[in-house]
Image (cartoon, rainbow, N blue to C red):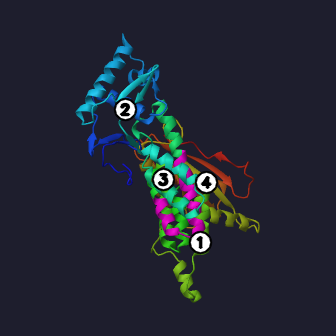
Amino acid sequence: MGKTMERDGKCLYVQMFGSFSMFWDGKLINASAKSSESQFMYLMQMLLHNREEGVSRDNLEQVLFGDRDIDDIHHALRSVIYNTKRKLKTAGLPEGKYIVQKKGIYYWSASIPVTEDAEEFQKLCRKADEETESGKKLQLYLEACHRYTGDFLANQAATLWIAQETKKYRGMFYNCVEKAVALLREGGDFREMKELGVYAAQIHPLSDWETVTMEALISMGQYEEARKLYDDTVELYFREQGLRPSDRLMKLFNELGSRMNHQYDTLDNIQKSLEEEAEDIEGGYVCAYPVFLGIYRMMVRMMERGGQSVYLMLCRIVDSKGNSMKEGTMLDELSTRLGDAIRVSVRHSDVISKYGRGQYLVLLVNTTRENCSIIQKRINWNFLVGRQRTGVRYYVSSVICSPDKGKKPLGKEMK
């Protein structure tokens, strides 16, 4: 349950966010994996969440029995309701009907009070929207954010009515976070803003909430922590979804560079700090995508003065049929191997950046298109092992060409 949900007193406390659970008099009312227990759980979820409007008999029968071939489905529903009432009485609830029917609509009995986390969350959101005093408004939004502890009935998202509620509550949560962040930014409370960003990212990973945390860290001058967060986030998004950083995250990364202040120092010391630390560095220069982007744009400017031939190469892992690999446990291991193969196959002055799961960009400096074919063969030599059926497809474009020219595969993918 959410941190602010109390379970004392004679009230049925219901958790809908995350996993489903019910508490009466401080005791958990469990439902096992048995079919009859699942029907008890589904019935309670629908009735408790729709206490005001109730649930029609047709809807209950559809959720409880689906397309099962039952001779008398109305009798089956009455049996589930009867067993549910008996279970609730055994759990310690006071004598009562619990479930009442009016004109084909089933309701939870008003004689048994209910506190539901989803309902409390919605009330807090509404109250925060209506509040006019900024301090109280912020506290209400923060309380609402922390009341939301995960997607609505997260383990049952395939059920239509649950999927609809999931979308609704997730949208409300996103709205609360965004409005709370705006108020925290306005008030300069970046410590609370950082904590909210971390919480939101934990609740909904891969939803770009890391940008909230990174903005707060930059505003507090915690640059090294912000840089580490950026690196970790980029790696996470590449690993889980094969995505490059969002425009918002890249903008914050660029701002991080402009906000970092250094002490006055001699040019010799500054130059020494700029040098790579590792000795006997092998292969090309591997960097994060924003760094690669900056280098690429600098090379484009240098091309205006002529004298260099630069090519951009995209290396993409393909399966035995030549189709791009986009998922699967094997892809991560292949992607790491491809990165190592590229690094040792290109020259010291070439630049490499991971562009997603199974994809790498390579900036080849002072080379020719013929040499690009040679580099491709070297990468294949270092990447392919034994009778490996996966391979690499290559695309090469001259940096000084227009975007619509020069993009064609070099060689064939290896199988």
CA distance for labels 2 and 1: 54 Å
Locate residue 26 relative to residue 246 in the image: left or right: left
Label 3 crowd bin: few (<14), some (14–19), many (20+), radius 10 Å: many
CA distance for labels 4 and 3: 48 Å
Q: Earlier in the sequence, mark 2 or mark 4?
A: 2
Q: Nearer the viewer, residue 268 or 399?
A: 268
CA distance for labels 1 and 3: 35 Å
Instruction: Please name the residue that numbered disc 4 is placed on.
Output: 313
Mark nearest the camera among 2 and 4 is 2
Q: Nearer the viewer, residue 244 or 59?
A: 59
Q: Earlier in the sequence, mark 1 or mark 3?
A: 3
Q: Residue at x 68, y 67 (%)?
A: 298
CA distance for labels 2 and 4: 58 Å
Q: Earlier in the sequence, mark 4 or mark 1?
A: 1
What amino acid is at disc 2? Met
What amino acid is at disc 3? Ala
Q: Is residue 191 magenta?
A: yes
Q: Earlier in the sequence, mark 4 or mark 3?
A: 3
CA distance for labels 4 and 1: 27 Å
Q: Is residue 355 magenta?
A: no
Q: Are marks 2 and 1 in contact (CB under 8 Å)?
A: no
Locate residue 74 relative to residue 306 in the image: left or right: left
CA distance for labels 2 and 3: 24 Å
Residue range in magenta is 171-198
Instruction: Please name the residue that numbered disc 2 is placed on.
Output: 44
- The extreme top residue here reads 71
Q: Which mark is residue 257?
A: 1
Label 2 crowd bin: few (<14), some (14–19), many (20+), radius 10 Å: some
Q: Main secondary structure of the magenta part?
A: helix
Instruction: Please name the residue that numbered disc 3 is placed on.
Output: 144
Does residue 70 lie above or below 273 as drawn?
above
